[in-house]
Image (cartoon, helix red, strand yellow):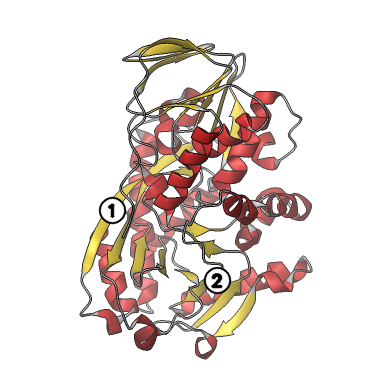
Amino acid sequence: MEAPPDPTEPALSGDADAEVAVVGGGLTGLWTALALCERGADVVVLEALRCGDGASSRNGGFLHGYWSSLPRLVETFGPERALEVARSCDGLVDAVRALDEDVWLTEGGTLLVSTAPAHDERLERDVDVARELGLAGEAVELSADELTVRSPLFRSAVRHRDGGTVQPARLVRALRQAVLRKGVRLHEMSPVLELEDGLVRTAGGSVRVRDVVVATNAWAERLPPVSRRIAVFRSAIVLTAPVGDLEARIGWSGGEAVSDARTYLHYFRPTRDGRVLMGSASGEIARAERALRAFFPALDDVPVEHAWEGPIDVSSDRLPFFATMPGARIHYGAGYTGNGVGPSWLGGRLLASLVLGDPVSSPLVTRAPVRLPREPLKMIGAMLVRRALLAVDEAEARGRRAPPVARAMVALPRAIGLPIASR
């Protein structure tokens, strides 16, 4: 039986002082606070609701860095810097273990599966790039017969070594307990109403600080330096009832995290308590459940017991970025683009380094993602591209060629230098 929720920490009341205020009590904010206090900083965390009440504790729970993203990294940064970014997440699993809490960590690697002929090129690209970099073990081709998980839709797959899964709410809870043990002052139910260099105000009080870290992910869109670097999309997940004979029905003895090669991908994994989680980057719960039934007809009699959908921050080049506002000691990070459970650990370390004035050479800090159009063009463009991508995905899944208008709209973002939500 799950333990009851931890008591809510009191809201900020009155005025206070601290060296650093971290705005946001999700994964990025908590990893940042932990990294800072381990280096002796006096930290206050301000969370609008309870820690993890957003996407941080309601997500697919895929725990991996960027080894499975080598093609995109090479395209964006070149081979040498791509490897630098990939290696920078290598301490992630050790950091999770060091929390010394049961977060349901399973290290089964990740699978990228092809479910249509149009997906095969994506898998081949993963394998080819890894080989070109002398890292063939990072992307290994598998036939459908070689997979431990069975689905009538699987044609082939690529296994990525890097990857595991966690129960994300347990990870948030472990981090929350860790920062409290370290002496971080945590104030929940304390939405920030005003933010300026050296001062943060909530309804109940204010904190005078030297530095501020904004770690609110999709909600960071309100911050001027971030607003044109990200677009807010949505993701959705469904979770089945426990399946006592899951392995007999569909295998999955290795516990791998799996995603398909659609642009608006499906992502799925088994849980420690025998459930199946299915996610849809379309942001629609109904699509996630339809995918569950299509991938695993052997589970048609298993009901869905839980569902969630919410916002995610998608950067203009689909990689996160971390920076400091010019002329102010306000630092921020955003743009995880659906892969934040693992990289938020790296984000916390990079943000802590920015606060403490350490030299930082990571391309995730030194680059500035391409700017998106101003509103309302950004919203309209995102809506049109989303519709086109979904149309292309659905056509390809049926082995058909998408309509010309949809294909042209899908190609447009990359043609103008914006790989956001593009293939």
Question: Three-letter amino acid code at disc 2?
Answer: Gly
- The image shows residue 391 at horizontal and vertical percentages of 33, 63
Q: Residue at x 59, y 17 (%)?
A: 19
Q: Quadrant of the rendered structure where residue 288 is?
A: bottom left
Q: CA distance from mark 1 to mark 2?
A: 25 Å
Question: Residue 308's mark?
Answer: 1
Q: Quadrant of the N terminus?
A: bottom left
Can the viewer see residue 403 in this picture?
no
Relative placement, left or right, of 38 versus 266 is: right
> Residue placed at 69% from the left, 56% from the top?
74
Q: Dot 2 surroundings within 10 Å: few (below 14), some, or many (20 or more)?
A: some
Q: Nearer the viewer, residue 334 or 121?
A: 334
Residue at the location (35% across, 61% down)?
280
Residue 200 at x, y = what percent?
Answer: 45, 15
Residue linked to disc 2: 108
Front label number (1 vs 2): 2
Q: Secondary structure at mark 2?
A: loop
Residue sitting nearer the eye, 269 or 324: 269
Q: Nearer the viewer, residue 168 or 236?
A: 168
Look at the numbered discs 1 and 2 and tell me whether their residues touch, using CB distance below 8 Å: no
Earlier-in-chain disc, 1 versus 2:
2
Q: Position of residue 158 (x, y in %)?
A: 58, 75
